[in-house]
């Protein structure tokens, strides 16, 4: 089916979409386990993630392992047809490790030690931490690698944190030596003659002491890159231990929504599948949009199906107010992940805990047990999912790509000293993504290393920092007939965070067909009137590029403010392609119209015609078979929607032909097979 044989093997073992969640039997008496497996069977659970934070229960003293309970629970699960995603417990070091070796604790950005009592209280650069993580991983792999229930390995959990310790300084220097080779190259890249920061010995180079003062922006950027790599080294170390014992099952870890400390493009390349934990806030009507973006990102990281590793059955417990999911929202969010390429619906957690910080976090099996709405919805979903089992492993195709690159993110928000220092990169990208989602387009995310040749449209939101390779790829893409939509303050600096000369927008001057002599951040509350050449008017705020067209034509100009009469939006023909450049932050409707027009002009058609914006649409198709699966998701809590679909469509959940139209009730879902 695909060239990922480990994931193919996993799908074959699970037999359809994986359904289940984190299971923490170590928190419960043995007598509860029998009820657990009986209810898992009832709900159609076929996979649980075991042992995520169980280090203290598996190794209560250094080197003394207590595997009896784990042996018993894995056998019990196996006997009941539930497969195991076995976790290494290294996200939660036991107190004997941190008390015995205080250097395992990370020192955080503010100089405070991250003490015992939470989780993730480890410095990823600590040799002692790594030694102990390797020992427990080896012991687990030796014991369970060949257990027939174990079909996947889950390394640690949601990797963090960012350390500022003496040992992280040593590791940072080694990383810098690999990157730059010589101190002279580092001094050049970091522009250290500014403020007399020239280094004359490697020992002088330390992590950026952020809270104390402003610091060198390239040093800060490199520290972000380094920390992502240091965390990744921990993953790779454990992965390789497991791999040495078992080579044919997937090994991965779980990612977070918009996590700024790890470059997931680099991470996903080291894993057998991308996997995501997602907690859209049921109290926010728009939260499904950023969920969709994160799902598309997960699919794009490897261009393959991915795993929804955690979601909440209802409310979480970590926010100020933790709203419940409305009836139907659990089902809708689960199909939304599948629509964007997930091959699993997994939850944190199976059974709600009695104690601990997350005692009020929802679970598949709530405190009130089976006499609860949430359980009924979980059970119904587990029974329904086999109806679309044939769609597991299917892939997606998009003609539109949106840039989401961690270096672009770090450059814009983590290095300070810009004309304005309040950019929110995930929000910026989401603002460019939302109109495409709501116009029912399929979208991939790309990074600086991506091949753009398969796309018709590439959207580059506020990419202040871009590397040379991406500039070349983008230039080739546009010359070859592609459409680029690029927004202000893009192309400004190189990968070393140094301003590209001789004029803004540096890397994109030829593509955009203008130069910018100054960047003008808006005053607090300031807005600008903008008029398009076709007579439509709108507003803008936040920022103005002071644009001087060279080869571009003007699509819209300011009609108020100091830049009245000057260009706000440009259109430039380049080779066989074209570029729309947006030099300000347009009102959302104006940005929407511009994006939708640009993709239409590029010949991209939406997945369905005429559906309202609150109905989300995504499509998966078999890589080599005839079928496609159209997912229709109604995010309105009040409105019903009717959507036209291909006449030959079969509604798999209803088990009936569509006759060319699907009616979706509030929060309703349909999965339509065509072809
Ligand atoms: C995740 C984490 C889980 C649990 C959950 C609560 O980020 O991996 O262990 O804490 O959040 O929402």
Image (cartoon, rainbow, N blue to C red):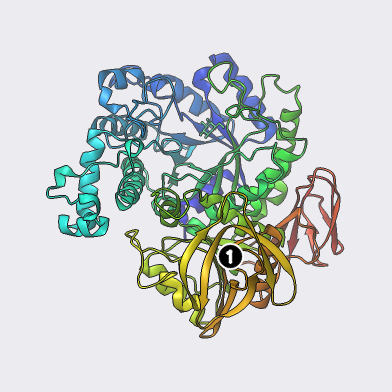
In the figure, is residue 278 to the left or right of 505?
right
At mark 1, the secondary structure is: loop
Q: Quadrant of residue 419?
A: bottom left
Residue beneath the point at 52% across and 49% down: 424
Q: Nearer the viewer, residue 421 or 462?
A: 421
When the figure is inspected, residue 256 is found, relative to residue 437, above or below; the finding is above
Q: Position of residue 524 (x, y in %)?
A: 58, 49
- Assign the N terminus to one quadrant of the image: bottom right
Give the residue at mark 1: 562
In the figure, is residue 211 to the left or right of 83?
left
Work out whether residue 535 can be spotted: yes
Question: Is disc 1 surrounded by few (<14), some (14 to 19) or many (20+) residues within 10 Å?
Answer: few
Please identify the residue farthest to the left as the structure is shown.
Answer: 200
Q: Nearer the viewer, residue 641 or 419?
A: 419
Residue beneath the point at 20% across and 47% down: 174
Q: Position of residue 59 (x, y in %)?
A: 35, 21
The response on whether ligand 1 sits within 8 Å of label 1 is no
Q: Nearer the viewer, residue 402 or 572?
A: 572
When the figure is inspected, residue 589 is found, relative to residue 104, above or below; the finding is below
Please identify the residue farthest to the bottom as the structure is shown.
Answer: 575
Q: Position of residue 578 (x, y in %)?
A: 56, 79
Q: Position of residue 139 (x, y in %)?
A: 32, 30
- Assign the C terminus to one quadrant of the image: bottom right
Q: Quadrant of residue 459?
A: bottom right
Label tally = 1
Work out whether residue 341 can be spotted: no
Please identify the residue farthest to the front as the structure is shown.
Answer: 562
Residue beneath the point at 67% across and 77% down: 601
In the figure, is residue 448 to the left or right of 49?
left
When the figure is inspected, residue 516 is found, relative to residue 575, above or below; the finding is above
């Amino acid at each position: 089916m695909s060239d990922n044989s480990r994931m193919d093997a996993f799908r074959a073992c699970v037999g359809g979409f994986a359904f289940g969640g984190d299971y923490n039997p170590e928190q419960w008496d043995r007598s509860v386990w029998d009820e657990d497996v009986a209810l898992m069977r009832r709900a159609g659970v076929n996979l649980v993630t075991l042992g995520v934070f169980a280090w203290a229960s598996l190794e209560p003293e250094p080197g003394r392992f207590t595997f009896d309970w784990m042996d018993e629970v894995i056998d019990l699960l196996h006997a009941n047809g539930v497969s195991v995603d076995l976790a290494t417990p290294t996200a939660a070091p036991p107190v004997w490790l941190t008390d015995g070796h205080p250097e395992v604790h990370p020192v955080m950005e503010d100089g405070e030690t991250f003490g015992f009592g939470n989780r993730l209280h480890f410095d990823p650069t600590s040799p002692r931490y790594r030694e102990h993580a390797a020992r427990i991983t080896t012991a687990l792999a030796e014991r369970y690698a060949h257990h027939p229930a174990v079909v996947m390995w889950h390394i640690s959990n949601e990797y963090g944190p960012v350390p500022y310790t003496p040992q992280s300084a040593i590791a940072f220097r080694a990383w810098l030596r690999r990157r730059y080779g010589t101190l002279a190259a580092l001094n050049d890249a970091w522009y250290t003659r500014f403020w007399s920061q020239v280094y004359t010995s490697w020992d002088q180079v330390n992590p950026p002491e952020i809270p104390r003062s402003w610091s060198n922006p390239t040093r800060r950027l490199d520290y972000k890159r380094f920390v992502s790599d240091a965390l990744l080294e921990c993953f790779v170390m454990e992965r390789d231990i497991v791999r040495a014992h078992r080579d044919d099952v997937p090994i991965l870890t779980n990612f977070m929504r918009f996590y700024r400390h790890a470059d997931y493009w680099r991470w996903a390349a080291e894993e057998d599948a991308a996997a995501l934990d997602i907690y859209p806030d049921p109290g926010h009507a728009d939260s499904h949009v950023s969920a969709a973006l994160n799902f598309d990102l997960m699919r794009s990281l490897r261009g393959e199906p991915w795993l929804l590793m955690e979601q909440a059955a209802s409310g979480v417990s970590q926010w100020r107010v933790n709203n419940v999911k409305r009836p139907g929202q659990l089902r809708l969010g689960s199909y939304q992940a599948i629509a964007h390429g997930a091959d699993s619906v997994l939850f944190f957690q199976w059974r709600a805990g009695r104690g601990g910080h997350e005692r009020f976090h929802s679970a598949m099996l709530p405190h009130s047990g089976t006499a609860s709405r949430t359980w009924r919805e979980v059970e119904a979903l587990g029974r329904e999912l086999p109806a679309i089992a044939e769609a597991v492993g299917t892939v997606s195709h998009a003609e539109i790509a949106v840039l989401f690159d961690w270096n672009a993110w770090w450059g814009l928000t983590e290095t300070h000293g810009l004309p304005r220092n309040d950019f929110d990169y995930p929000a910026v990208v989401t603002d460019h993504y939302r109109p495409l989602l709501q116009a029912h387009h399929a979208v991939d995310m790309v990074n600086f290393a991506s091949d753009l040749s398969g796309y018709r449209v590439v959207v580059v939101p506020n990419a202040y920092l871009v590397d040379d390779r991406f500039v070349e790829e983008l230039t080739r893409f546009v010359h070859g007939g592609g459409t680029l939509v690029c927004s202000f303050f893009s192309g400004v600096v190189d990968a070393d965070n140094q301003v590209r000369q001789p004029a803004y927008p540096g890397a994109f001057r030829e593509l955009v067909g203008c130069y910018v002599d100054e960047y003008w951040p808006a005053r607090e509350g300031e807005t600008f009137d903008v008029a398009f050449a076709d007579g439509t008017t709108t507003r803008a705020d936040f920022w103005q590029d002071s644009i001087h067209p060279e080869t571009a034509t003007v699509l819209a100009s300011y009609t108020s403010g100091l830049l009245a009469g000057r260009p706000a939006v440009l259109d430039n023909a380049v080779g066989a392609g074209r570029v729309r450049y947006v030099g300000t932050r347009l009102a959302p409707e104006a940005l929407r119209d511009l994006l939708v027009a640009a993709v239409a002009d590029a010949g991209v058609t939406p997945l369905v015609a005429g559906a309202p914006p609150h109905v989300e649409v995504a499509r998966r198709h078999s890589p080599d078979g005839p079928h496609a699966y159209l997912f229709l998701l109604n995010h309105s809590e009040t409105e019903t929607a009717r959507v036209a679909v291909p006449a030959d469509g079969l509604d798999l959940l209803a088990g009936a032909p569509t006759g060319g139209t699907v009616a979706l009730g509030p929060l309703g879902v349909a999965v339509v097979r065509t072809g």
